[in-house]
Amino acid sequence: MKYMKLGSKPDAFQTEGNSIRSVATELAVDIVVTVGDVKFYLHKFPLLSKSSRLQTLVASTSEEGSDEVDISDIPGGPAAFEVCAKFCYGMVVTLNAYNVLAARCAAEYLEMSETVEKGNLVYKIDVFLSASIFRAWKDSIIVLQSTRPLQRWTDSLKVVNHCVDAIASRASTDPSEVDWSYTYSRRKLPSETDGDARGWNGVRKRQAVPRDWWVEDLCDLEVCLYRKVILAIKAKGRTGGAVVGEALRAYACRRLFGSLDHAVSDGLDCTKHRAALEAVADLLPAEKGSVSCGLLLKLLRASCLLESGQAYRGELIRRIGAQLERASVPDLLIPADSGDGDGDATYNVGMVAAMLEEFLLHHKVNGAEAEKREDGEDDVDVAADDPVTSSKLAAVAKLVDGYLSEIAKDPCLPLETFVALAESMPPLSRPVHDALYRAIDVYLKVCTRKIML
């Protein structure tokens, strides 16, 4: 982590309880600065020599016969003011990624600029940010995370934009130019802990860096900041859709899928989950194959659990339909919601039927332009003449039959819904019908048990 030390005098600040700070010196205190619940007993000269705002405030309070100044609205609170005060006294203070932004905003508030004194705190921090912090991967992320409680000030200082651009630039760097020291959340590989990973010629081998080296680190960001960074990465145009898709998958696993079922079942506030869902859905890259079918299905399931994301469902269904052969039966078991139209059915069969319709439509277009051949056969059969399409149709038919076996266990599943889904696949997609017969058998047994009850 990058850091900067300012000042040369020993730190003479003392603490009394939780609410009093003072400087150990023989000089009498002549100003009290109040910051929230903390009072600082200090001296006018070192403070006023570097802070234009304190000059103004002290002048106005002196006219009232008071030696106390209240700056409880200073960004960063007592800790940030203490950094600024120590700088005024010339005491040693260390700035790093964790405290530099609060100190910068506090210095701006106190008007510690070059017009007051050359080499003032605002100038020194700006140099540190541009020359060190924004050049370091980890530090840029830490600073960006610290912008939320200081938003009013960071917006005017353009700090968020600088951080986002710095992170996006690093993430867009060619992996051949990236060293593992950029990232900090990745676990070391065994070859890196050996201490002597060398090739046949005795030369130490450099560990190859994957294109998605930055993905896990960005999962620490809150949704609004994460959205800004991903948009900036996409705008750079140097990162492929597959890498962006992997980043979104990792973020969704961390911020959405991991705790969603628990939050919904326990009736907890799901505001953050909805924000994560909307962000990931908005940021999905348009490139074909950039996002897995499994991720799309999980996002669709999340939208149903949260009863939100209606605007994204159509696009998700369209994209899932284009690669439905890659889905699995568990992914299709999306819970029903009040808008399904199947009464008390457990699963959202209508949504799966829409995916299937998209799949068939997609392959009709690819297989032939007309809906009917001259001999009257379905266009789907024409598409099936292509070996690749035929293989996909067979895979989806197997998927549908497996799905039917699962939903057949639901006693509330309407017969017409079951039949419509079973008949949705073209005949040539099923070389054998054993799986379909098993699904029908399960459904009939459930219906019989229901009648007997």
Image (cartoon, rainbow, N blue to C red):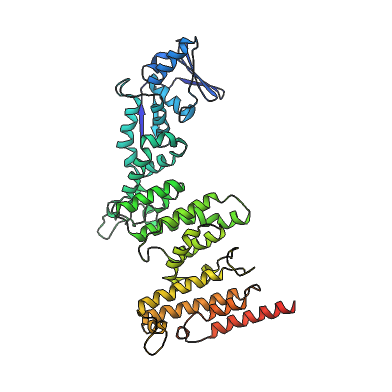
Q: How many marks?
A: 0
Comparing 379 with 213, the one in front is 379
Establish if 69 lies above or below 138.
Answer: above
Residue 266 location (% of width, % of height): 63, 54
**Along the viewing direction, whichever of 254 and 6 lies nearer the viewer:** 254
Residue 337's image quarter?
Answer: bottom right
Residue 282 in sight in this render: yes
> Residue visible at 40% across and 39% down?
143
Q: Residue furthest left?
A: 201
Quadrant holding the C terminus: bottom right
| Residue 123, image x, y percentages | 32, 28
Q: Residue furthest right?
A: 453
Quadrant placement of the N terminus: top left
Q: Residue furthest bottom?
A: 375
Provide residue 205's location: percent of width, then percent of height.
Answer: 29, 56
Q: Nearer the viewer, residue 401 or 63?
A: 63
Which residue: 52% across, 57% down? 257
Which of the 4 image quarters holds residue 19? top right
Any part of residue 220 in sight: no
Q: Is residue 285 above or below residue 449?
A: above
